[in-house]
Amino acid sequence: MSDRGATQPGESATRPAWYTAAPGAGRDWLSVLHLPYTAWHLSYVLIGAALAPVLSVQRLIATLLAFALAVGVAAHGFDELHGRPLGTSIPTPVLAGVSAAALAGAVALGGAGIAEVGWGLAAFIVVGALLVVAYNLELWGGRFHNGTVFALAWGAFPVLVAYYAQATTVRPAAVAGAVFAYGLSRAQRTLSTEARDLRRRVLDVAGHKTYCDGTRSPLSRQTILQPIEQGLIALSWCTCALGVALVLARTGT
């Protein structure tokens, strides 16, 4: 995940995603981590924690680390195992082992937090682990691999868990924050699905736009892809900025 820019007119859209690096041992791991999207979804953890009536930095760091392992490493690793959408050459046993270990680490962190937060956290841990496996490995015929589950799992869920880890309950503020994250995640998936389709399956686009004054503008894969990916780039960094701003405001920084 690391090419740092949307496709420009005339640039070949041959990479599987705008953030993927050129093939290579270390660069393949960067691509699998989906760094801009991982940061985006970790921002929901910041938002959820900042909405809680009391903010514990220690609990926030533990929650961030757990989600970084579960989403950033495990979920994306399992996703790459299912059909190699990024085309990486990481050996399957290594990718599977690292993904499983990351998920186990996330569960262990959550388990350690039960002593401080309470047994209610256990329900979130179980649900989170199931979502990572079911969504990314497309179990049960891919029934859980859809926009609704994506928005619930990677948008609403981090907000609710982070809030609960701070407040040991879920209040209306957490629900409202989860609704925000759900909607933004639905928008993300809608845009990213179209971008992936253009990059990975579309060979060519032919046609033009005709304006009211009679002028025409040619259509191509690049001209369609560019605004979609620029929108995703903007949404990713501005959501991160919002999460950081809320935590800084709560901590008086």
Image (spheres, rainbow, N blue to C red):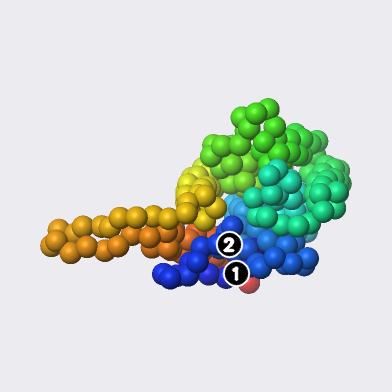
Q: Is residue 247 visible?
A: no
Nearest to the observer: residue 190 or residue 215 = 215
Closest to the camera, between mark 1 and mark 2, is 2
Element marked by disc 2: loop
Q: Is residue 225 left or right of residue 189?
A: left
Q: Which residue is mark 2?
A: 15
Residue 246's mark? none
**Percent coordinates x, y for residue 228 in the rendering:** 44, 58
Q: Which residue is mark 1?
A: 3
**Percent coordinates x, y for residue 66 in the rendering:** 77, 51
Check the picture and name the quadrant holding the C terminus.
bottom right
- Amino acid beneath label 1: Asp
Nearest to the observer: residue 19 or residue 35 = 19
Q: Is residue 38 left or right of residue 73?
A: left
Nearest to the observer: residue 237 or residue 253 = 237
| Lower position in the chain sequence, tag 1 or tag 2 | 1
**Percent coordinates x, y for residue 115 in the rendering:** 86, 43
**Percent coordinates x, y for residue 5 in the rendering:** 53, 69
Element marked by disc 1: loop
| Residue positioned 66% across, 68% down in the render | 22
Picture quadrant where residue 151 is located: top right
| Residue positioned 75% across, 54% down in the render | 73
- Amino acid beneath label 2: Arg
| Residue positioned 47% across, 70% down in the render | 11
Q: Is residue 22 visible?
A: yes
Picture quadrant where residue 35 is located: bottom right
Marks 1 and 2 close (CB-CB < 8 Å): yes
| Residue positioned 58% across, 62% down in the render | 15
Furthest toward the top, the residue is 140
How far apart are the alpha carbons under marks 1 and 2? 9 Å
Check the picture and name the quadrant holding the N terminus.
bottom right
Classify mark 2: residues with Cα within 10 Å, few (<14), some (14-19) or many (20+). some
